[in-house]
Image (cartoon, helix red, strand yellow):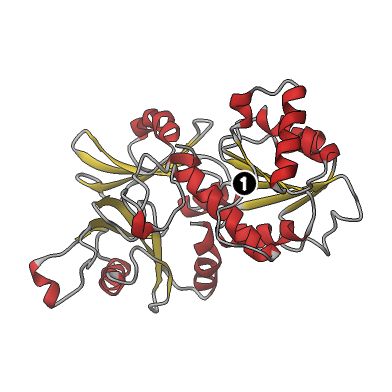
Amino acid sequence: MKELLPEIDRWRAKGERVALATVVATRRSAPRPVGSKLAVSESGELAGSVSGGCVESDVVLAAQEVLAGGPPRLLTYGITDDMALGVGLPCGGEIDVFVEPLE
Amino acid sequence: MTLFDEIRRVVEEGGRAVVFTVIAGPETGAKLLVREDGSIAGSGPAELAQLAPDALRRGRSHVLEHEGRTIFADVLGPPPRLLVIGAVDTAEALCQAAKLLGWTTIVADARAAFATRERLPSADEILVAWPDEALERVQPDAGTAIVVLTHDDKFDLPALTGALASDAFYIGALGSRRNQERRRERLLEEGVSPADLDRIAGPCGLDIGAESPAETALSILAEILAVRAGRAGGPLKEARSRIHPEPEEAASGKK
């Protein structure tokens, strides 16, 4: 959390809103431990991470929906059937990520 | 003050708290901050506050079910601290490397000419103090690692006996094998028990062929991380256990 604060402050100083994505649970292998955070600014800047770059692009989309007024979201990523189309964790684990506006 | 500002204050001050967030069920998104002293902020279900002491004891963020809601309990705590006794070159390298991990670093040395900001630009705190006084001020706890770099008995002995009297999760001492042996005898003479002596990693560090201060620092920090996770510190390729620590294994810095 602490390491994200300078970036979050910078965005907020520009008047941008910020969404926060947090790893709330992991099953089997997972690239980042529970509690890891990714902050997303309204203009799409990123700080921190919730995986090794595997699912961030999808989390950013969810973050932008949340910033546009959508409800907070609980997302689950793992190896799924739609992996060929989208994002997933190649390591074989599964993670739950909660996305909410920072306020 | 927004709830985020309240949370950031806890983080910046290195305080302990739990942030409860409803992640599924009624009021999804509602949050409650519960500080270690029991004070609360936020609009989440206030009865969650009673779960905070247990979450703080666990020391690790986790999900729980509470009256039809799924709750994420995010446990906030200060980063581990590294206390280095002896303001030698390796002390600065250790502080640099520990900063990379987000740790808080303190260097103590009784010699004022050594313990200077110019020599230790990466230390969060510099104490011109004898080991016992430094330990008294720092109050090492289960989230503190202590590395003794002085390799001079008049500093090493009080530093190590003092460190052994604390809950520090790691105690390391630099020095050649011959030095270690002599120091061991001296500590036994001073009444330190053999079991306590086994808590000292000496010579400290993993066997990676480190030579320069930066290499030595990396070797020592790697050992500190291994001890914290209860690992042996060998190549992952040869390890039988999981790559990342088990959730409970890494709890609050101590196995």
Indicate the position of residue A35 as horizontal and vertical percent values. Answer: 38, 52
Residues B228 and B59: in front is: B228
Residue at 91 percent of width and 55 percent of height: B113
Observer able to see residue B5: yes
Left or right, B215 with reference to A19: right
On the question of residue B76 being in view, the answer is no
In depth, the one of B30 and B224 nearer the eye is: B224
Residue located at (62% from left, 25% from top): B194
Q: Which residue is label 1 attached to?
A: B81
Quadrant location of the C terminus of chain A in the rendered image: bottom left
Tag 1: amino acid: Arg
Q: Nearer the viewer, residue A18 or B231?
A: B231
Residue B127 point in image, percent of width and height: 81, 47
Q: Residues within 10 Å of mark 1 (few under 14, many from 20)?
A: many
- Residue B71 quadrant: top left
Element on which disc 1 rests: strand
Compared to residue A99, the image places residue B175 above or below, namely: above
Residue at the image position 77 percent from the left and 29 percent from the top:
B186
- Percent from the top left, x then y, of residue B34? 45, 37
B225 or B150: nearer the viewer = B150
Q: Position of residue B209 (x, y in %)?
A: 59, 62
**The numbered mark 1 sits on a residue in which chain?**
B
Q: How many marks are shown on the rendered structure?
A: 1
Name the residue furthest left: A81
Q: Is residue B46 above or below residue B78?
A: above
Q: Residue furthest front?
A: B178
